[in-house]
Image (spheres, rainbow, N blue to C red):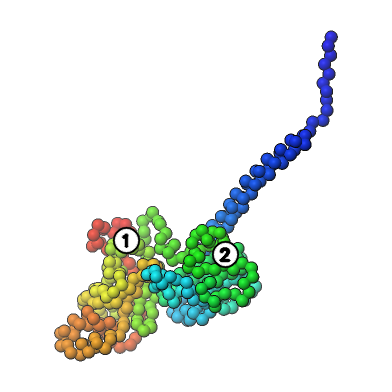
Amino acid sequence: MTQQHKKCGKGGFTLVELVVTLVILSILFAIAVPSLLGYIHLSQFRKNESYAKTMYLSAESELTYLRTGGEWESFCSKVKKEGVLNQSFDESDEDRKKLVGRIYGIRLDAGEYAEGELSGDGALVGALLSQDTYDKSVLNAAICIEIDVESGQVYSVFYGTNCKGLYYGSNEDSKPADMSGSWLDIDYSKRDRDTRREERLGYYSVQDAVNAVSLDATKLKITSINLVNGETLSLNWSSNVKDQDLDKVYYEVKLYSSEDKAQLLSINIPGRNLKTGSQSVAVTTEDNATKDYTFPVEYDRTNKRATLVLDGMMNAKLYDRLDKLSADNEAAFRQSSDTSITRFGGKLEKPLNVYAAVQVFPDPNAENTGGEEY
């Protein structure tokens, strides 16, 4: 009889097996860690992009409140005094050339909000954002709000959690006294997505708001309105109408007396007439008479902003011509060439306080549409 004996003992790994295992783990970590860090980096960038958009909408909402409440001029003066002018726009580009001298940045450095009472341009940022921001901790980042002082709208918002603050490399006045640490240059040439992604710097601008794509039926709306009494009496407004759809809508501008709320003028402007230059549009005056009058109009495609000059002075040459016309010819001349608001007669012949309203409607007379898109 043959007896078989099992040899019993404790199992284990040999040195070679341990070395091979460690080498494999090292290779896996070498592959996985950069991918994980890249994912975290991208996640932070997307989060900051989202915060930038939220703050853009919040700041624009507050500016709309200031414009409609008659507080814009005062706030604008503070922006020009405390903010920094963006001098980095390329004047060789026609669209960006229009923005030269108009875009001011107001900034909040990282941690500045948590330190307590704000001052300077940081206080202006806080005024625009703190009202609608539930979680105040998000304001402890580096933030820059760019404001178009001509239109009274937010041009863009930067939001960074990976830097101490933001500055314009082209404007020495914006550079911090101590450049140690991480300070990011936000000149126009440094705003491309790849550059910002590297720095995890969120950004949202008026172009992003205009180019947002929606597959739903569009509800027409005026997104901002501003009546400016300066060298001219100008009415600025913007809407959500795309350039390709301007022919399908018309704008109705109404001017009222602040004293008794009486309607003074009703101006019907077809969307196709929203282009820079003198435009003839239908005007209904106090006596309900409707005639075509010429107005200076400007339309900025960059931010969908229209400007209608309601009242402006004529030059000496036109005044000289007016003096030589007969009564009948004078009336026709005032309709086509005069830009004085007194040409409409009635209460507008004397100085008075006015306010304006703008609405946008689908145009049932437009070609290839019955307004069904809106």
Determine the residue positioned at 36% across, 84% down.
231
Tag of residue 244:
1
x then y, percent, for residue 128: 52, 72
x then y, percent, for residue 96: 41, 70
Q: Label 2, on which residue? A: 160
x then y, percent, for residue 294: 25, 77
Which residue type carries mark 2? Gly
Residue 230 falls in image quadrant: bottom left
Distance from the alpha carbon under mark 2 to that under mark 1:
35 Å
Answer with left or right where residue 333 lies relative to residue 107. left
Tag of residue 366:
none
Please give the count of numbered marks on the rendered protein. Answer: 2
Determine the residue positioned at 34% across, 74% down.
307
Name the N-terminal-most of marks 2 and 1: 2
Determine the residue positioned at 48% across, 66% down.
189
Dots 2, 1 in contact, CB < 8 A: no
Towards the viewer: 107 or 98: 98
232 is higher (above) or lower (below) than 210: below
Determine the residue positioned at 84% across, 9% down.
1
Towards the viewer: 118 or 302: 302
Mark 1, Cα crowd under 10 Å, few <14 / some 14-19 / many 20+, is few
Secondary element under disc 2, as helix, strand or loop, is: strand
